[in-house]
Image: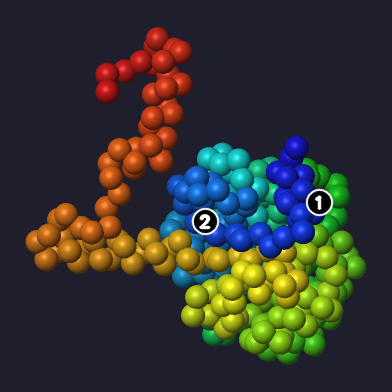
């Protein structure tokens, strides 16, 4: 099965898929080790991790594709890649979709924000006109149909500036154009989330940012509303950053034995040292003193 086939099989199941989002190969490995079924490369978290900068369109297509490739090579989980606005016009969208498929992604997200885009839960975002938005999804679907197998996650941020009716209308047209998964970003109430699921066809994704604009509803409620995927884009990064900041504060205060340290043996195991050594036993030239 291709990564896209594995994602299709998951979406065919009648349940909510809880999706912690990764930002690099190591965070993706931890998600897989925890037993989750899929992950998403969060643009917000990947930008912070790779270039130490906010998610304001600063990462290039090549950097995003490279980050996705590294993640796909490290795990067997289906990965949804963040393709932002497609990095240009409709022809750029086609290249982005094909490139993310070659990187190993099961799906790629294409959105209707103006460029440079920004995190959906931060100020200042806006969307392109309908026809440009539709051209992006049409181009993405064409690239999917003509190239390597990949699903299209179509996102609209129109709720922020144009209202929920416009966001739903855009998402409905995305579905008509052939998008596989729909994502209406930042509904502000549970009632709005129910409208999204009641009025739109196919699988829908909820984006749960702790402290963001969308209600942080329990998984059981999200499933009852009708969502098929619940994405948590910043949970791991926020947890990791908090632990790192507190560890640094402890070290600066003269207490190097910080409270958040993972045992060294577990650290090695989770990264893959134990597996490497076990496999290397079959090759005399690879054997090295430990």
Give the answer, above or below, for where 242 lies relative to 91.
below
As drawn, the label of residue 144 is 1
Q: Residue at x 66, y 59 (%)?
A: 17
Query: Label 1: how many residues lie within 10 Å, few (<14), some (14-19) or many (20+)?
Result: many
- Quadrant containing the C terminus in the rendered view: top left
Which residue is at 55% across, 66% downward? 232
Instruction: Point out residue 78 in the picture as x, y percentages from the top left corner.
Output: 65, 48
> Which residue sits furthest left?
254
Circles 2 and 1 in contact, beta carbons < 8 Å: no
Q: 203 or 224: nearer the eye?
A: 224
Q: Residues within 10 Å of mark 2 (few under 14, many from 20)?
A: many
Mark carried by residue 262: none
Q: Earlier in the sequence, mark 2 or mark 1?
A: 2
Residue beneath disc 2: 22
Q: Position of residue 13 (x, y in %)?
A: 76, 54
Can residue 108 be seen here? The reply is yes
Viewer-nearest of labels 2 and 1?
2
- From the viewer's perspective, tell me whether residue 46 is left or right of residue 203: left
Task: Name the residue located 28 percent from the left edge and 45 percent from the top edge.
Answer: 263
Residue 183 seen: no
**102 relative to 107, above or below:** above
């Amino acid at each position: 099965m291709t990564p896209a086939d594995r994602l299709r099989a998951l979406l065919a199941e009648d349940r909510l898929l809880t999706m912690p989002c990764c930002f690099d190969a190591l965070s993706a490995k931890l998600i897989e080790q925890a037993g989750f079924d899929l992950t998403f490369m969060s643009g917000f978290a990947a930008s912070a991790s790779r270039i130490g900068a906010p998610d304001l369109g600063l990462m290039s297509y090549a950097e995003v594709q490279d980050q996705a490739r590294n993640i796909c090579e490290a795990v067997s989980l289906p990965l949804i890649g963040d393709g932002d606005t497609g990095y240009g016009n409709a022809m750029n969208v086609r290249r982005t979709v094909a490139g993310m498929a070659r990187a190993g992604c099961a799906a790629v997200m294409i959105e209707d924000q103006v460029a440079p885009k920004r995190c959906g839960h931060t100020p200042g975002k806006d969307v392109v006109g309908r026809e440009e938005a539709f051209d992006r999804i049409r181009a993405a679907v064409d690239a999917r149909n003509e190239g390597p197998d990949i699903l299209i996650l179509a996102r609209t941020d129109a709720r922020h500036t144009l209202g929920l009716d416009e966001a739903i209308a855009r998402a409905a047209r995305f579905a008509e154009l052939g998008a596989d998964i729909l994502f209406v970003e930042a509904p502000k109430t549970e009632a709005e989330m129910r409208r999204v699921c009641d009025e739109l066809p196919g699988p829908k994704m909820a984006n749960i940012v702790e402290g963001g604009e969308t209600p942080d509803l329990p998984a059981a409620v999200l499933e009852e509303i009708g969502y098929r995927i619940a994405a948590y884009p910043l949970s791991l990064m926020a947890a990791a950053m908090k632990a790192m900041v507190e560890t640094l504060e402890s070290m600066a205060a003269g207490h190097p034995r910080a409270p958040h340290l993972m045992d060294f043996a577990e650290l090695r195991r989770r990264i893959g040292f134990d597996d490497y050594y076990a496999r290397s036993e079959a090759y005399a030239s690879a054997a090295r003193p430990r």
